[in-house]
Image: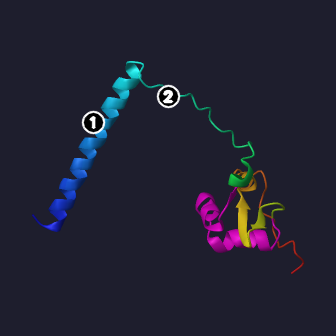
Amino acid sequence: MDHDQAAVAELRRIATAAKELATALEAAIRNGLLSVPEIPPVSPSVDLGDEDWIEPCVAAGRAGKSDTTIRRYVYDVRYPGIGKKIGGRWKISSKVLRQVIAGELPLPSKRTNGR
């Protein structure tokens, strides 16, 4: 058996084990042996505290922009409150980023830092 066939066989084994586990969990829930708590959805307007600050590369992925563009938003002070240094590294506010993506904070037509 070559390497590719071995990998496929291992993936099939894992998939079968995952299906068996899912079946067992469903049975446990159905029989009252396991309960699953109801988790309410998080509103975009909820402040998530420290978790609300993300890396610029993550922000870029969410916004469909480049890292450089996100860093310019911070450096050029285009959106007040979008970035701050935490532990010596720049972080981006998820809350402000969501407002930018939703169009609630339109992109300024020029830099606002005086350059």
Numbered label attached to residue 36: 2
Residue at the far front in the pictured view:
33
Residue 23 placed where, x, y %? Answer: 31, 31
Q: Quadrant of residue 25?
A: top left
Q: Classify 10 Å Cα crowding around label 2: few (below 14), some (14-19), many (20 and above).
A: few
Looking at the rendered image, the quarter that the C terminus falls into is bottom right
Residue 27 placed where, x, y %? Answer: 34, 24
Q: Quadrant of residue 93?
A: bottom right
- 69 is within the stretch colored magenta: yes
Residue position marked by numbered label 1 in the rendering: 20
Q: In which quarter of the image is residue 40?
A: top right
- The residue sitting at 21% across, 60% down in the picture is 7
* 64 with respect to 70 (left or right): left
Q: Classify 10 Å Cα crowding around label 1: few (below 14), some (14-19), many (20 and above).
A: few
In this picture, which residue range is highlighted in magenta?
53-78
Residue 70 placed where, x, y %? Answer: 69, 68
The residue tagged with tag 1: helix, strand or loop? helix
- 57 is within the stretch colored magenta: yes
Q: Which amino acid does label 1 sit on?
A: Glu
Q: How is the image coloured?
A: rainbow
Gap in angstroms between the C-alphas marked 1 and 2: 19 Å
- The residue sitting at 66% across, 67% down in the picture is 56
- The residue sitting at 81% across, 62% down in the picture is 79
